[in-house]
Amino acid sequence: MSEAVVTSTGEVMPDGLKGVVTDFSSDKQSFHTPWGKAMMWIFLLSDTFIFSCFLISYMTVRMSTADPWPNPSEVFALSFGGEPIPLILIAIMTFILITSSGTMALAVNMGYRKDKTKTFWLIVATAVLGASFVGMQAFEWTKLIVDEGVRPWSNPMGAAQFGSSFFMITGFHGMHVTGGVIYLLWVAFRVRAGVYERRGGNYEIVEIAGLYWHFVDLVWVFIFAFFYLW
Amino acid sequence: MASQEGHQEHPLKIYWIMWGALFVLSGFSYWTDFWDDGPLRTGAILLFMMLKAAGIVAIFMHMAWERLALQLAILLPPIFVIVFIAIMAIEGDYTFLTRIEFFGESDFVPQVPHH
């Protein structure tokens, strides 16, 4: 049975669950930043480990298979009537995601300037670019499954592990983008409704949403390098 | 200079430069796809990847202007992933050698993807 404790400075520490929180926090703040931002960073750190696990398992299966690994440059080539251009769709997707990161950075900046209209439209632009990224990914998956016969357990172009790695990694990333689009639209409409304006022009939520969005772009940088280029 | 807690307002110019740099670096990344395989290409892929990642985290995510306590709390733990990579690389290599030893070379005949 825990009891309330009086410290040497004469302070009474509460017992029970409240005491646990008081003891661990000691009523002190470690990160001098809005708590939402610190929590988003910690979430992103945990997400980093999830994507690390995906990419490391991809490395392991690619190293350990005796079958030839399909050449992503050829697999993801796309023909616009003429000769197939290597990796072109992935390159376009990369540029779209970078563009969306830029519009998001500007949205955060406009939020700090308390410019409601520009913040709203820049977030909407980011969400639209994100949605088009997911659309292209859906096209890419369809092409791979229907035309090239890639399955999580086999494919005609090489090692079976190619399919499972591809669907898990890009699928999980695409899910993050989809979630991000929904999150951004929610924030955008709250910006337009004047929710943050009424909080004395406190637009830190926009920066927190921006952190998530930039992280999605960051993960794509690694997927592009390790899965598509390597 | 002391600033208000959590306030990350910076000149717009920084974002335009970073945005442009990301476009150029991504162009370089795509360019490496046309190079011949080798240590030079692998090095270039990693270099452009790290530069892009650093730019996004430092500028777009404002990590460069955060307090050192937050920077260390977030940026140090992922370094341990390198240990995990090393462990799994050893494991992958061992599995590959074992497969070659017991099952022999692959007789898989790859098909060329059609577009």
Image (cartoon, grey):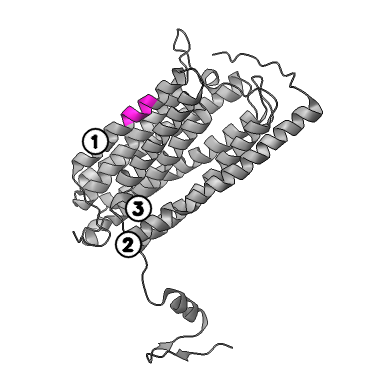
Mark number for residue B17? 1
**Position in image of residue A92 (x %, y %):** 40, 25
Disc 1 secondary structure class: helix
Residue at point 19%, 39% (across, down): B13
The quarter of the picture where the C terminus of chain B appears is top right
Whole-number angstrom distance, CA of label 3 to CA of label 2? 9 Å
Which quadrant holds residue A125? top left
| Horizontal arrangement in the rendering, residue B112 relative to residue A102 (left or right) | right
Mark number for residue B39? none
Can you name the residue that lies furthest to the front here? B39
**In the rendered structure, which amino acid carries the disc numbered 2?**
Pro
**Position in image of residue A16 (x %, y %):** 52, 82
* A12 vs A171, nearest the viewer: A12
Q: Which residue in the structure is indicated by mark 2?
A: A34
Query: Within 10 angstroms of label 2, few (less than 14), some, or many (20 or more) residues?
Result: some
Which quadrant holds residue B56? top left
**Position in image of residue A155 (x %, y %):** 66, 23
Q: Which residue in the structure is indicated by mark 3?
A: A208
Residue at point 35%, 34% (across, down): A98
Judged by depth in the image, the label closer to the viewer, 2 or 1, is 1
**Position in image of residue A176 (x %, y %):** 47, 43
| Disc 3 + disc 2, Cβ < 8 Å | yes
Query: Within 10 angstroms of label 1, few (less than 14), some, or many (20 or more) residues?
Result: few
Q: Which residues are magenta?
A: B23-28
Residue at point 25%, 58% (across, down): A202
Tell me if residue A48 is in the magenta stretch: no
Query: Within 10 angstroms of label 3, few (less than 14), some, or many (20 or more) residues?
Result: some
| Disc 3 + disc 1, Cβ < 8 Å | no
Whole-number angstrom distance, CA of label 3 to CA of label 1? 22 Å
**In the rendered structure, which amino acid carries the disc numbered 3?**
Ile
**In the rendered structure, which amino acid carries the disc numbered 1?**
Ile
